[in-house]
Amino acid sequence: MAPMMLILDVKTRWSSTYQMLLLDPRIAYKGLKEDYKDDETLLSGLEKSKATLRAHFNEFYRAPPAPDPSTTTTLQSISPADYDFMARYEIKDRVSVDELEEFWNLPREDIRTCDPIQWWYSRRHHFPSLYRLARNLLAIPGSAVAVERIFSGARDTISLRRASLKPQTIEILMLLKHRLRLARTSTVQSHK
């Protein structure tokens, strides 16, 4: 890999790691800021990642603002018979809030007992847009070893006699093989 590509790769991976940590309820912005308080370079990187995460969130995840009812219809355009007196007392959706700031202002969760994926799932109604972003970032495996292990068995599945199999068939065979291996391991461990 060329040196410039390596630098770009490291920056990209580090940035996505920061973004993932910024959405981890056990660490979040407060935890990182506290850890980096004595290092201006790290604080600067944290702020850049925070801004990048906000821009990404705003561009791809933030829900569009609800239309202002006063601009769409006026009281004069509605006849008195059609006017619903009770409508003004109905509970409205939450006022538009900055989900990122609201999340970053929450106290951090206990790192030993909190599962970030479960935490976000249980708060998906409170942070609907941010939940989608967190789910996408936090679900990225830390290592591709497990995936590589599954697909390294492809040479056993795709022999000369099976070279004409469709890609979907090969994928299904490889996943079935992996499931069988997991089931066998589980059975052996349960009998110990």
Image (cartoon, helix red, strand yellow):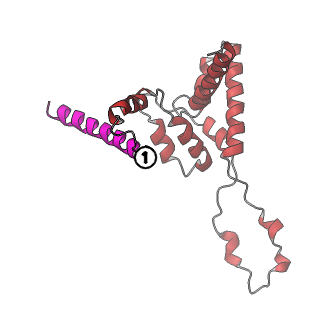
Q: Residue furthest bottom?
A: 81
State the residue in front, 65 or 155: 155
Image quarter (top left, top right, bottom left or bottom right) of the N terminus: top right
x and y percentages locating residue 122 in the rendered image:
48, 47
Q: Does residue 105 appear in the picture of this structure? A: no
Task: Give left or right: position of 21 versus 53.
Answer: left
Q: Is residue 172 magenta?
A: yes
Task: Give left or right: position of 157 versus 73.
Answer: left
State the residue in front, 12 or 19: 12
Q: Is residue 109 magenta?
A: no
Q: Quadrant of residue 49?
A: top right
Residue at 84% from the left image edge and 79% from the top image edge: 77
Secondary structure of residue under mark 1: helix
Figure check: 119 above or below 32: below
Mark 1 neighbour density, 10 Å: few (under 14) some (14–19) many (20 or more): few
Q: Main secondary structure of the magenta part?
A: helix
Q: Quadrant of residue 86?
A: bottom right
x and y percentages locating residue 31 in the rendered image:
58, 25
Figure check: 115 above or below 43: below
What span is in magenta? 165-192
The residue that disc 1 covers is 168
Q: Does residue 120 appear in the picture of this structure? A: yes
Task: Give left or right: position of 138 versus 63.
Answer: left
Image quarter (top left, top right, bottom left or bottom right) of the C terminus: top left
Type of amino acid under label 1: Gln
State the residue in front, 137 or 6: 6
x and y percentages locating residue 26 in the rendered image:
51, 30
Q: Residue furthest left?
A: 191
Residue at 32% from the left image edge and 37% from the top image edge: 178
Figure check: 139 above or below 34: below
x and y percentages locating residue 24 in the rendered image:
54, 33
